[in-house]
Amino acid sequence: MFAPFYPLSTSSFFMKKLLLPLAAAGGILLSGCGGGDGSSSTAVQDITSPETNVTRNLKPDYTSSEVATLAANNNKFAFEMFKELRATEGDTNIFYSPYSITQALAMTYVGAKGETKTQMAAALHFEQDDETLHNNFNWLDLHLNYTDDNYTFSNANSIWPQIGYEFEQSYIDAIMLNYGAKLLLLDFAADPDGAADTINQWVEEKTHERIKGLIPKGQLSTGTKLVLVNAVYFKAKWENEFIEWETYDESFTLPDGSSVQTAMMHQQNYFYYSEGENCQAIELPYKGGRTSMVVILPKEGYFSEVAENMPSVYSQSMAAFASTEVKLKMPKFEITTDLYPLKEPFENLGMTDPFDPDKADFTGMSKNPLAIGSILHKAYIKVGEEGTEAAAATAVEMVTTGIAVEPQEPAHMYIVRPFFYFIKDRSSGQILFMGLTTDPRAAN
């Protein structure tokens, strides 16, 4: 077992006890290049074929160092994908769940072979052998799934095969063993939009209705053969809550240098904090200490430098954390992202063959040819006095083919210009969500 990465902040004010929901969901859509088969309705059916007697391994072999390596490698991918999103979206509000993406693609990776597998491993930083990789994903998932009176994190997987379509038994068994997926049948050939609605309903249920419309109308086709879905839900209380009546409008500086008025929350408390030449950083823990939000605020004139060097800024900031009394002001904000098409970012990361019908090799999944057609992601986050509410979704369609400064007086961290933030598991270090807020008023 891991020891908590940091102890909890100590002091608190007279604060309400508030629940903070956060959810994410991801899915993988696989389809064949030819026409569909089967004629049953799109209603969910209990699994009859492919059959499996394999159940989830609830005690996977692992070591703490191996899981830490997996989390570190997942975080490498998270930062690289963030760079790709900034290149596409510019310095606008960005929010996504790298954990949802890696979970969804890890289940796809089980069926990859040859150069397809090599390129996926390089892009996702899957550097461990198959058995170790999937054991560690299984352990990390089981570790993250936890519920008590103050905290909930749940991760659910499901796979939805086309009725009558042939899949490799070893693939189905591996998904059951390591990812505990619910196995359900649909008939995409008869009604692909109806099948999408059914899957979307499952996602809504697993995310407490925070994620809706994961699969857009028209996304699936009569050639869809399999959909894999990951859904994550998070609900927690801040360790140190903001007081609602201490929130009032103040100025926030936008990337173009102009200022806007936005609701700003305030509190003074002890937090893990660090400050270097180009940024300030703070960790805001959730109740129980399992997860926290890390906020990195570039100093004036250093935004681009911090953004371009985010992996090292993130690690150096956390390494320099020290318990410090901080006067904190932080904007309330709510952001809904547009759909992020991730095919091009993955191709930029070197994952090209999996999208090429003539080169993709997913024969570990099915003897019939399959290739990734598109990868889609969208997300939502709301931050206020009560805490954090967020959601994210991933869909992958397949077709056949700093140095710390310890001030003598309370530190001041006034988040009044664009900032970066991360929600992470504190023991493994796994980044669950990450984002950039450049305009707290926007609902993009």
Image: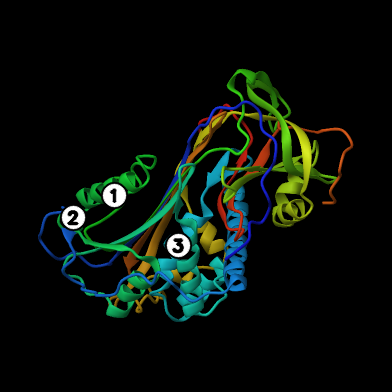
Label placed on residue 142: 3
150 over 137 or under it: above or below: above
Helix, strand or loop status at disc 1? helix
Q: Earlier in the sequence, mark 1 or mark 2?
A: 2
Q: Are marks 1 and 2 in contact (CB under 8 Å)?
A: yes
Q: Is residue 288 visible?
A: yes
Q: Are marks 3 and 2 in contact (CB under 8 Å)?
A: no
Q: Is residue 375 left or right of residue 86?
A: left
Spatial separation of the CA atoms under disc 1 and disc 3: 20 Å
Label placed on residue 73: none
Closer-to-camera residue (393/174): 174
Question: How busy is the neighbourhood of tag 3: few (under 14 within 10 Å), some, or many (20 plus)?
Answer: some
Q: Is residue 106 left or right of residue 35?
A: right
Label placed on residue 44: 2
How far from the left and from the top, in percent, is residue 25? 41, 50
Mark 2: which amino acid? Val
Q: Are marks 1 and 3 in contact (CB under 8 Å)?
A: no
Mark 1: which amino acid? Trp
How far from the left and from the top, in percent, is residue 400? 31, 69
Label placed on residue 202: 1
Give the residue displayed 57% in from the left and 51% down from the top. 290
Helix, strand or loop status at disc 3? helix
How far from the left and from the top, in percent, is residue 186? 19, 59
Q: Earlier in the sequence, mark 3 or mark 2?
A: 2
Mark 3: which amino acid? Leu
Q: How many marks?
A: 3
Residue 175 sits in quarter:
bottom left
Q: Of the residues tagged 1 and 3, which is closer to the observer?
A: 3
